[in-house]
Amino acid sequence: MKKWHIKNEEEMIALGRQLGQWLDAGDLVLLEGDLGAGKTTLTKGIGQGLGVTKVINSPTFTILKVYQGRVPLYHMDVYRLEGMHQELGFEEYYDGDGVCVVEWATFVAEELPLQRLEITITHETNGRLVQMTAKGEHYEEIIEKVKM
Ligand SMILES: Nc1ncnc2c1ncn2[C@@H]1O[C@H](COP(=O)(O)OP(=O)(O)O)[C@@H](O)[C@H]1O
Ligand SMILES: [Mg+2]
């Protein structure tokens, strides 16, 4: 587990950019944190690290948005699926040709592969605490490379 104290939005994007640089096709990133914690902001940075040039916005009303970068970025926000426990048919995306970033991932926990990078964002007095936990050796290597 690795953690960072993030003072503002710019730093959150920079952290995401760092991480995005090292992500590749088939990678899965789970984002946990309250509304306004900074999940989408971190995803904007991940997109930059993946070479996405379009502006990334909250996908809340569409569940899934696809962005073209070095590899595709599949940005999911499953907030609206709380308690629905239905098959989404997203399996093809996990372990697919792109990077999956899932906001509110606990709502679809059963559906997600066990090997993943779990990121928790919490509010603190002067910003946000970002904790990254690797599930699997592959993600441990990625976390190691993230320098901020
Ligand atoms: N340290 C910080 N890191 C990230 N966002 C921050 C920070 N401080 C303030 N903010 C603000 O908090 C909000 C986070 O929103 P967003 O990324 O959409 O959250 P979420 O997707 O978790 O609901 C943004 O308006 C951003 O400007
Ligand atoms: Mg969001």
Image: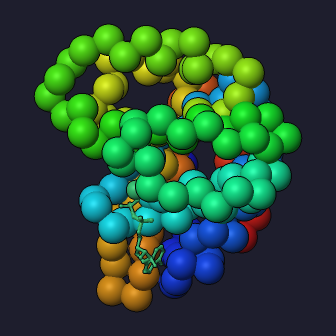
Q: Residue furthest left?
A: 83
On the picture, is 84 further left or further right than 28? left
Q: Could you say which is closer to the camera, residue 2 or residue 128?
A: 128
115 up-or-down from 51: above or below: above
Q: Quadrant of residue 12?
A: bottom right
Residue 3 percent location from the top left of the image: 54, 62
How many labels, in total?
0
Residue 148 percent location from the top left of the image: 71, 70
106 up-or-down from 95: above or below: below
Q: Could you say which is closer to the camera, residue 66 or residue 128?
A: 66
Residue 81 percent location from the top left of the image: 24, 32
Quarter of the displayed picture in which ligand 1 can be seen: bottom left
Residue drawn at (48%, 35%) of the image: 64
Residue drawn at (14%, 28%) of the image: 83
Q: Could you say which is closer to the camera, residue 3 or residue 113?
A: 113
105 up-or-down from 2: above or below: above
Residue drawn at (52%, 83%) of the image: 8
For residue 104, say whether it is visible. no
Q: Could you say which is closer to the camera, residue 97 or residue 14?
A: 97
Colour pattern = rainbow
Residue 7 percent location from the top left of the image: 51, 84
For residue 67, say whether it is visible. yes
Residue drawn at (44%, 48%) of the image: 59
On the picture, is 29 further left or further right than 21? left
Q: Quadrant of residue 16?
A: bottom right
52 up-or-down from 14: above or below: above
Q: Quadrant of residue 138?
A: top right
